[in-house]
Image (cartoon, rainbow, N blue to C red):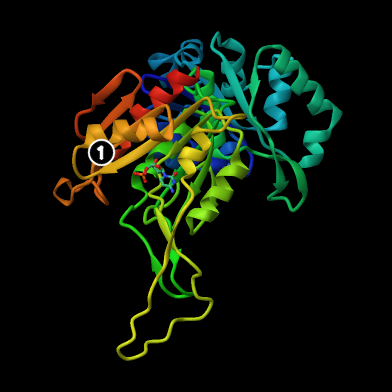
Amino acid sequence: MLQDKRILLILTGGIAAYKGLDLIRRLRERGAAVTPVLTRAAEQFVTPLSVSALAGEKVYRDLFNLTDEAEMGHIQLSRSADLILVAPATADIMAKMAHGRADDLASTLLLATDTSVMVAPAMNVRMWDHPATQRNLAQIKSDGVSVVGPNKGDMACGEHGPGRMSEPMEIVAAVEAYFGLRPLSGKRVLVTSGPTHEPIDPVRYIANRSSGAQGAALGQALADLGAHVVFVTGPAVVPPPIGVEVVAVQTAQEMKGAVNAALPVDAAVFAAAVADWRVEGASAQKLKKVAGDMPKLQFTENPDILAEVAQMDQGRPGLVVGFAAETDDVVAHATAKRARKECDWIVANDVSPETGIMGGTENAVILITDHGADPWPSMSKTDVATQLAARISDALT
Ligand code: C5P
């Protein structure tokens, strides 16, 4: 979250300026206030009206504008923010920054400021590779400017290579990292989520009522704190989080394979509702209905993925968290489960139908650790996820 942060966003002239509009939205969604500045060239790509509508603030465009000077001079404007972000940053603005030029509002603000500056370059690959741009880049970096991107890829001009502006969410991540809001940066976290489907034959399966909502919220909260999240998900109702590595599986055995492939990790959170049993020798052909003859399904136990990871001799994640969905004696059952599986924490909840938790938006959990049982008040699954992610972050850092 970027609450109480003011960002002076300078948009310079490039086709990537359209991504600047989305960047404004993303920053504001996280609570940041955005003061927009447009260069003359940027106005060829986005209009001052759309920029100010999205920012919810006046757009600054002119160096010599008496109204602006009366309201806020350029010196004051350059110092009014917690961070100055130049996105997209053209080769031209980088050259001006490297040489200390001040011939328009944007370059003057960048010269006059005593605030940190971050740039997200965007330009043609030849312009990026040019020794002059690389010299300017090295110069502004040594002046203390932080640089996000650019990415490699297809460019609007039809060429391919480095020069594409970073995606808005990558820039937001860099801004949050700047403010120290990404404590899990560099950490790898595994989250399992959703139900599993255990086939009876090619068209029928055994499933459960897990929607995957709590697991998805948790994956999102951990990714928002900067973790690289490997999100191993069964066929869930809710979509996976944004900005995570998604591994989609169907069965418990596939989930086990995906979990093993994701290791080693710093922390592993098992929020999936894994089927305890699967049908032994599931039929390769659709079972035929024969009058009076019921199919006799033979069950066999699925691997307990959580217990296997928690009991690893070598390479065990530093923190292993399980979930326990219970319908009675929640604390006693969950405490016994924690001991039996040898995980560090159990997040327990009462999933009796009258609680409405399974498939609902609210959750009331009890966190069971080696300090005992800590019941949390009822809150949204998103809030449970945010608080649990914060606890995981504390444990890992
Ligand atoms: O034993 P139970 O299914 O109640 O345990 C729930 C916890 O164990 C959850 O964290 C779930 O993700 C995990 N689990 C697992 N593999 C299984 C069964 C449960 O990882 N086969």
Q: Is mark 1 within 8 Å of ligand 1?
A: no
Relative depth, front residue between 84 and 391: 391
Residue type indicated by callout 1: Asn
> In this picture, is 206 found above or below 212?
below
Q: Quadrant of residue 87?
A: top right
Q: Give the farthest residue toward the top.
A: 114
Task: Identify the residue at image location x=45%, y=49%.
Answer: 240
Residue 343 percent across, percent down from the top left: 43, 31
Q: Which residue is mark 1?
A: 349
Secondary structure at numbered mark 1:
strand
Residue 194 percent across, percent down from the top left: 40, 51
Residue 361 percent across, percent down from the top left: 25, 45
> In this picture, is 244 found above or below 68?
below
Relative depth, front residue between 27 and 265: 265
Does residue 364 appear anywhere in the picture? no
Q: Give the farthest residue toward the right.
A: 131
Q: Give the farthest residue toward the left.
A: 354
Does residue 276 appear anywhere in the picture? yes
Task: Identify the residue at image location x=70%, y=25%.
Answer: 94
Could you tell me how many numbered marks the image carries?
1
> In this picture, is 330 found above or below 283?
above
Q: Which quadrant of the picture is home to ligand 1?
A: top left
Relative depth, front residue between 58 and 170: 170
> In this picture, is 147 found above or below 255?
above
Lateral position of residue 15 relative to residue 230, left or right: right
